[in-house]
Amino acid sequence: MTVDPASLNILHYPHPALRAKAEPVAEVNHEVRRVALRMIELMTLAEGIGLAAPQVGLPWRLFVCHVPPMEGRSPDSDPAGATHQPTVYVNPVLSGPAGPVEPGDEGCLSIPDVVGRVLRPPIITVSAIDLEGQPFTVTAHGLLARCWQHECDHLDGVLILDRMAQMDRLRNRRLLRELERA
């Protein structure tokens, strides 16, 4: 399947592609690089911090993420792995969750205006392949760790709706119905 990156856009709930389990990317090639750059562009335009390939209709195990270091804060207070540039994660695998799960408010570019509390471990390690085809492993905490877990959920067809607290689902019921009708 040849993909025209210019044709990619963020899909919205309840699009069926958001519930499909993504398949591993066979190789990092020119097409994968072009798609990743388009995904970074879409994520940035939407003012998001992460975007997974299923959110643009591709059944690929790939996501992009950008949690920049926080201005005016000490390096110790920034998430490990926070960078000034977006990062691409091809065939990511999460491991080593650490610490008691913590609640955090999460939104999703594919479910506009819906926010809910989701429980996640505060520390996680990701192993993936970069755009040069090189494997890497990094551990993060805080918002970056939460972003990786959120995006990996997308690769398995899991949405924040499946993980958020019941009260948050009820509070967002009207918005979800509007999305389902649209």
Image (cartoon, rainbow, N blue to C red):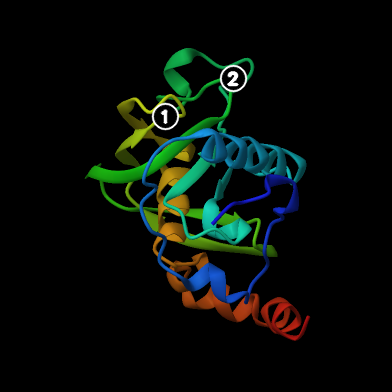
Q: Is residue 81 above or below residue 48?
A: above
Q: Is residue 100 above or below residue 86?
A: below
Of helix, strand and loop, which one carries label 1? loop
User: 98 or 53, which lies in front?
Assistant: 53
Q: Give the residue at x 65% y 75%.
A: 172
- Answer whether residue 161 is visible to the viewer in this image: no
Q: Give the residue at x 39% y 63%.
A: 156
Marks 1/2: CA–CA distance: 16 Å
Q: Amino acid at mark 2?
A: His
Residue 139: image x %, image y %? 31, 30
Residue to which mark 2 is pinned: 84
Q: Which is more foreground, mark 1 or mark 2?
A: 1
Lateral position of residue 64 relative to residue 114, left or right: left
Residue 102: image x %, image y %? 37, 51
Q: Is residue 144 above or below residue 173?
A: above
Residue 152: image x %, image y %? 41, 52
User: 65 or 1, which lies in front?
Assistant: 1
Of helix, strand and loop, which one carries label 2? loop
User: 113 or 100, which lies in front?
Assistant: 113
User: 23 or 179, which lies in front?
Assistant: 23
Q: Amino acid at mark 1?
A: Asp
Query: Number of numbered discs present?
Result: 2
Residue to which mark 1 is pinned: 130
Q: Rate crowding at label 1 as few (under 14), some (14 to 19) or many (20 or more) other CA atoms within 10 Å.
A: some
Q: Give the residue at x 56% y 22%.
A: 69
Residue 149: image x %, image y %? 40, 50
Lateral position of residue 34 relative to residue 78, left or right: right
Q: From the image, which quarter does the N terminus lie in?
A: bottom right
Q: From the image, which quarter does the C terminus lie in?
A: bottom right
